[in-house]
């Protein structure tokens, strides 16, 4: 059994702005039509177990922890308005939808990976998003990350080649270098090379000596 877990919020962005590039201005419901079409394509290719996680509300508990964390400010109203429409349409297709309010779509995807991996019938979990955060969930070739836009599949060895560290260090890596998609800048003086070099040796921030 193969399980497909889709980052619905990213997919909506991709479909909406992809249409804008092609047509100069996205047609009405471009995000909805695009995500339904791409999901139907997965089904046509033989996918049998699909779940889509969405940020039903963009803000989450992380906004209480860090004031600079990403919000819905600046997000086009036409996209916000389509979130519940996409969720209802996917449910009507028989697709499992995780509409997140307090937590994020990423949290649902990571939880979905953990649950799927406990099922011995599942031989592979495919996380459909290029979001670096989800790289920490990759494991061997059983859990892989798929960038559908660029037709790239990242297994554990590919994660190590790309970042210079294993999946278990991705969260700490992003804490050091920052993540503009989530609205936090990282630590001054830390770049991709220095972070990967140190974490390749110490694995986690907690293990780095104070005098390093």
Image: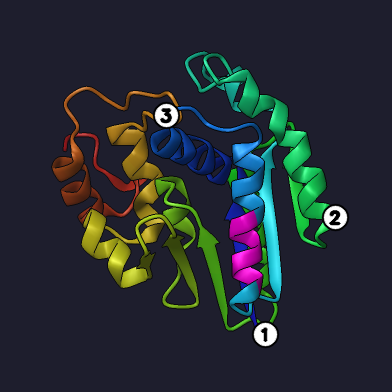
Q: Circle 1: is it few (<14), some (14-19), or many (20+) Cα within 10 Å? A: few
Image location (x, y in percent) of residue 37: 62, 56
User: Residue under circle 3?
Assistant: 24
- Badge 2 marks a residue whose secondary structure is helix
Q: Circle 2: is it few (<14), some (14-19), or many (20+) Cα within 10 Å? A: few
Magenta stretch bounds: 37-43
Residue for point 42% across, 31% down = 181
For marks 2 and 3, the one nearer the N-term is 3
- In reply to whether residue 60 is colored magenta, the answer given is no
User: Residue under circle 1?
Assistant: 120
In the image, taking residue 64 as reference, residue 144 lies left or right, namely left
Count of numbered marks = 3
| Quadrant position of the N terminus in the picture | bottom right
* Of the two numbered discs 2 and 3 in the rendering, the one whose residue sits closer to the viewer: 3
Residue for point 70% across, 60% down = 51
Main SS class of the magenta portion in the image: helix
Q: Is residue 94 visible?
A: yes
Image location (x, y in percent) of residue 120: 67, 85
Image mark for residue 30? none
* Labelled pair 2, 3 in contact (Cβ < 8 Å): no
* Labelled pair 2, 1 in contact (Cβ < 8 Å): no
For marks 2 and 1, the one nearer the N-term is 2
C-alpha separation, residue under disc 2 versus residue under disc 3: 30 Å
User: Residue under circle 2?
Assistant: 92
- Badge 1 marks a residue whose secondary structure is loop
């Amino acid at each position: 059994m193969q399980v497909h877990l889709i980052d619905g919020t990213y997919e909506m962005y991709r479909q909406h702005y992809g249409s804008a590039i092609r047509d100069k201005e996205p047609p009405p419901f471009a995000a909805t039509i695009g995500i339904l079409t791409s999901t139907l394509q997965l089904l046509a290719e033989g996918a049998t177990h699909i779940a889509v996680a969405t940020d039903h509300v963009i803000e989450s508990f992380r906004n209480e922890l860090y004031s600079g964390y990403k919000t819905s400010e600046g997000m086009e109203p036409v996209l916000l308005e389509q979130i519940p429409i996409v969720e209802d349409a996917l449910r009507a297709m028989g697709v499992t939808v995780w509409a997140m309010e307090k937590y994020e779509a990423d949290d649902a995807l990571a939880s979905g990976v953990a649950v799927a991996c406990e099922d011995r019938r599942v031989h592979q979990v495919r996380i459909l998003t290029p979001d670096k955060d989800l790289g920490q969930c990759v494991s061997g070739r059983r859990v892989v990350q798929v960038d559908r836009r660029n037709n790239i599949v990242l297994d554990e060895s590919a994660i190590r080649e790309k970042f210079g560290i294993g999946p278990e260090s991705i969260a700490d890596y992003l804490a050091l270098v920052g993540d503009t998609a989530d609205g936090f800048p990282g630590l001054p003086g830390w770049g991709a090379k220095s972070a990967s070099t140190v974490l390749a040796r110490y694995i986690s921030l907690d293990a780095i000596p104070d005098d390093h």
